[in-house]
Image (spheres, grey):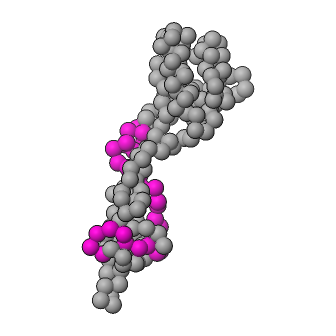
């Protein structure tokens, strides 16, 4: 039987415990040679708290983990009965494996999001913001342009009575 990737539904907040339990079953031999990888897709998220830039990890599928497993009846039963697991994604009696292309996309997104933190707050054109960092600190303005790939926005700020575009990073401003 070939190994496939499956999605396991867990109680929210129990993803790490479930992963640890599966890995413990592998170490003890109960799932040895059946489970190959356990993945909790996460991304780095940047935000500003108390004037300091903070980067934290956020799960982008809360309540779900991915497992690469040779899924026979024994492995299915053992994983399903781990505390915190509510079941596999699929029908009630038959888990449905992910397509190889879906797995590659999820792994690619995980890798990309580890390298470049995603802003916790997303801005849109027309939002009112206050600059909290940099040379224009305490100025207020309106978002004119958003560049999510670079994590930057262009803010129109009144300087000496004139609307002036100022490019800022997401974490240098806060929504009003």
Judge by depth and name the residue closer to the eye, 55 or 144. Answer: 55
Residue 131 within the magenta-colored segment of the rendering: yes
Q: Return the residue found at the far bottom.
A: 161
Which segment did they paint magenta?
108-136
Let me know if residue 112 is in the magenta part. yes
Q: Position of residue 37 (x, y in %)?
A: 46, 23
Q: In the shown orientation, is residue 37 left or right of residue 157?
A: right
In the rendering, at what x and y percent does residue 107 appear? Answer: 43, 35
Q: Pick out the residue farthest to the right.
A: 92
Q: Residue furthest top?
A: 29
Foreground residue, 29 or 151? 29
Q: Is residue 17 above or below residue 22?
A: below
Q: Position of residue 165 (x, y in %)?
A: 32, 77
Where residue 3 appears, as percent x and y from the top left, is 51, 17
Instruction: Pick the quarter of the image with the N terminus.
Output: top right
Question: Residue 149 vs residue 5: left or right?
Answer: left
Image height of 151 relative to 107, above or below = below
Q: Quadrant of residue 48?
A: bottom left
Name the residue: 54% across, 13% down.
Answer: 31
Q: Residue at x 39, y 67 (%)?
A: 173
Determine the residue positioned at 73% across, 26% down.
92
Can residue 49 be seen from the camera position used here? yes
Whether residue 153 is visible to the viewer of this picture, yes or no, is no
Number of numbered markers: 0
Q: Residue at x 72, y 22 (%)?
A: 93
Q: Looking at the picture, tell me which residue is in the foreground, 81 or 9.
A: 81
Is 63 drawn above or below residue 136 in the view shown?
Answer: above
Residue in the foreground of this view, choosing between 139 and 143: 139
Quarter of the image for residue 105 reads: top left
The residue lying furthest to the left in this view is 135
């Amino acid at each position: 039987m070939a190994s496939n990737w499956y999605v396991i539904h867990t109680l929210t907040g129990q993803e790490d415990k479930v992963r640890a339990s599966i890995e413990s079953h592998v170490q003890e031999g109960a799932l040895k040679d059946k489970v190959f990888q356990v993945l909790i897709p996460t991304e780095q998220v940047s935000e500003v708290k108390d004037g300091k830039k903070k980067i934290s990890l956020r799960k982008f599928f809360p309540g779900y983990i991915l497992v690469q497993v040779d899924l026979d009846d024994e492995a299915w039963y053992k994983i399903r009965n781990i505390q915190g697991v509510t079941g596999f994604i699929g029908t009630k009696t038959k888990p449905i494996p992910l397509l190889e292309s879906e797995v590659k996309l999820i792994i690619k997104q995980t890798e990309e999001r580890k390298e470049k933190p995603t802003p916790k707050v997303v801005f849109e054109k027309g939002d009112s913001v206050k600059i909290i960092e940099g040379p224009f600190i305490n100025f207020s303005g309106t978002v004119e342009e958003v560049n999510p790939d670079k994590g930057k926005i262009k803010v129109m700020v009144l300087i000496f009575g004139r609307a002036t575009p100022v490019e800022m990073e997401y974490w240098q401003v806060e929504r009003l």
